[in-house]
Image (cartoon, coloured by chain):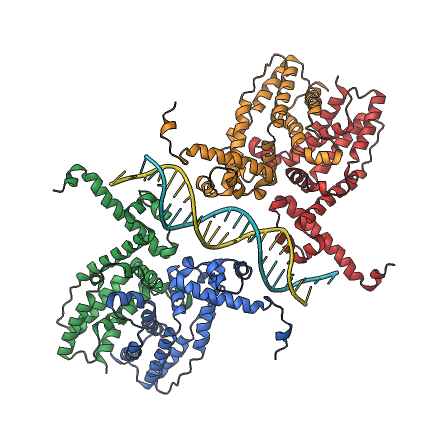
Chain colours: A green, B blue, C orange, D red, E cyan, F yellow
DNA sequence: TATGAATGAGCTTTCATTCAT
DNA sequence: AATGAATGAAAGCTCATTCAT
């Protein structure tokens, strides 16, 4: 319908594809080396376009990084939207949420690296985004519902703020992925070893349920 | 009073002091900006010596970083050696250990930043150290003893590996400090806010004791 | 006259020319001071471009040196291709070849200096070239032909390998140019003095012919 | 006898020994890397003394180099003094001189490298020596005598200046050693190969005798 | 005589960015 | 919309040398 779509459809789509490709390659580069360690030249080299194009589309290294970060969060949040948990059994539900979070972090190490990188930068890049509401995790809403049911049913005896519980779960899941390198070096234990996954997955659930039901 | 104060020359001399000063300033610079973001010029500027001296003492930026990291770990471990916990009441003991860890991380944010930075680098700088045994946390030994007593007394009902429990505690304490910037941006909550400290401090103890006593 | 002369922009553009200019100036700098003694800054200063451009075109000081060396050899070889010698009289022919080599070395002292420099470096820079076959002197082929005719005619009575004869001639011509400074200092004789040129030119011919005809 | 020899004989001798050791190590370093390529640190590292001592004894890198060069020439000249040639047969005598020169150069590649290096520097370091007369090769005097006898006996028919003949011989011997690296790279022939030595040794004699006896 | 500590000056190289069409 | 060529500024690092006793 749009005039451009009829006159130069290939170009238009290519532009979108090029942008996406740059973003994709940049995500890996930033996740691998941090903001300062990332090289615009390297990103360009791994793309079918040139360095000049990166500036053409993204203006600067910093803005490119911001777009990378934004997209990473958006993808994560989109995935979280899918959270479909049966609330009939609160214990099982909160355990299930923990597992989903656990699996999710494990399968998105680049995202976790970007978050670490952003924290090293004191989140000053994020601060330049226009909107944040869209980034707020839908997980907290799910947690809130589960807690509500749990308290109503009397199966949860200790009260906790949903955001705090989200933090507790995240801490466990993030640490395991984010700090695995130094942890392995010091304790000679690979927290992300396949053989240990199930152990930690269950430990998380036990920990959360233990917290909510004791006292 | 000291004889050296009268004989010491105008410049330099105390090589050990100069080295220590460089290390000190470098710790802040690396913690603030990461390895690639840190500037040797900046470190020099904040020291009474020159950039040349940094290379004289530390050979390269990377070796300086390694020394910074090593010293950071050694200081932390030295502090942990002080852990003096009364084991008579296992519940109270493990709670106390959690609090000490909690306080410790809170008061050493630079160390936590360095650890994050090192994990971004996949711990490859640490890997170049000669010895690691000295870095192994004494906390795990303390935990082991507490658990032993707890199981013997029958107050702890769920078994856990000491290293895993150390991980659980660390995850909570580290996340709160390391990820506070992105967390605040997204959830509008400063995890290190003074007003919230006691809440999280207690939450950690409840979480650990809850885990060990439930089931 | 050329259309490009009217449309060309103010700065740069002719990349090939810039490259050639850098190469030219670099040749002199390396020939004058050796690899380690040469200064990239100095090369830049004598060019219409900047130091940055040198790295843009040549990546590193070493690669620039390699290109300089390669080009020097190629120019020399191209000149040797012109060798047009009448083979009818073998004695005259080999004498003529000696003279051409003699003149050639005299008029290319920079090339001889570069060769000395490369030998100091044990030819390790040359070793990084891809192909050498192109550098093989065409002079040896010419020598081979002259020798063949000489032996067939019976005017040459001593056999010698063409490459060895090339070496004998080169040794004489190269030494006179390459070692003239120390020779002059010690023997107070400038081997490249104009007044002596003809004497040495003829001495070379006599030496070669003497070798081939005696015994 | 001297007072110092009785009061601190060890020190005195050590000083001389240290100087000699530095000179020895420096010779190799300069011969290996040229003047600019040589590293004072490296020389110090390979000595039992410190870098500071090098400056204590030799004032500067350049003066150290000059001493190295001077000593190298003096050793060579001292060896040449030994030249003991039977003059009864001029042909055999000049052939013998050539062989001695040939062997001499082959066994002192470092000297030849230093000479090349000095020529790269246009002999400006040598120019700063106080005396040169001592450096003048005694070989020319020997050559002069042999020539004299040869002309008197009528076995040599072509006249040549002794210094020029020395040059002719040196050119052959020096080139073979000095330019062997580039020569091997280009012609795939190692001029200093053991298997070829006798061939070139004889070629030199034939060349010289051929020159002196032809025409 | 001997020396450990210090250093100014300058080197090669890198990097994000913009010019000019 | 797209791009090859160019670049200012600064980074990490090196080197011969001297200070201060």
**Vertical placement of A99 versus D171: above or below?**
below
Q: Is residue A123 left or right of residue C155?
A: left
- Above or below, A5 against A104 in this view is above
**In the figure, is residue A113 to the left or right of C155?**
left
* Residue D190 visible: yes
The quarter of the rendered structure image containing the N terminus of chain C is top left
Residue C115: x percent and y percent? 59, 34
Q: Is residue B30 left or right of residue B55?
A: left
- Give x and y (percent) for residue B82: 44, 80
User: Of residues D194 and A93, which is closer to you in this image?
Assistant: A93
The one of D104 and D14 positioned closer to us in this rendering:
D14
Task: Give me the residue at 69% from left, 53% from top.
Answer: D59
Asked if residue A134 is positioned above or below residue A152 in the image, the reply reads above
Q: Where does the image place residue B42, in percent across and percent down from the top left?
A: 46, 60
Q: Residue furthest bottom?
A: B88
Residue furthest right as drawn: D1
Left or right of D202: which side holds D85? Answer: right
Residue C163 or A61: which is nearer the viewer?
A61
* Residue A200 makes an appearance in the image: no
Q: How many marks?
A: 0
Residue D148: image quadrant is top right
Of the 4 image quadrants, the one containing the C terminus of chain C is top right
x and y percent of residue B137 in the render?
42, 73
């Amino acid at each position: 319908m749009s005039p451009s779509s009829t006159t130069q459809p290939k170009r238009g789509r290519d532009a979108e594809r090029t942008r996406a490709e740059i973003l994709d390659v940049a995500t890996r580069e930033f996740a691998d080396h941090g903001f300062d360690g990332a090289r615009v030249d390297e990103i360009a080299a791994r793309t079918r376009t040139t360095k000049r194009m990166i500036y053409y589309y993204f203006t600067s290294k910093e803005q490119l990084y911001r777009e990378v970060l934004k997209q990473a969060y958006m993808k994560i949040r989109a995935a979280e939207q899918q959270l479909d948990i049966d609330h009939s059994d609160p214990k099982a539900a909160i355990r299930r949420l923990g597992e989903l979070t656990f699996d999710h972090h494990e399968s998105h190490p680049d995202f976790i690296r970007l978050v670490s990188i952003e924290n090293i930068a004191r989140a000053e890049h994020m601060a330049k985004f226009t909107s944040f509401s869209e980034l707020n995790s839908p997980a907290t809403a799910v947690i809130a519902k589960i807690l509500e049911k749990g308290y109503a049913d009397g199966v949860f005896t200790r009260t906790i703020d949903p955001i705090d519980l989200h933090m507790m779960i995240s801490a466990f899941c993030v640490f395991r992925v984010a700090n695995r390198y130094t942890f392995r070096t010091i304790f000679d234990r690979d927290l992300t070893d396949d053989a240990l996954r199930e152990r930690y997955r269950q430990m998380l659930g036990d920990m959360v349920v233990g917290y909510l039901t004791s006292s």
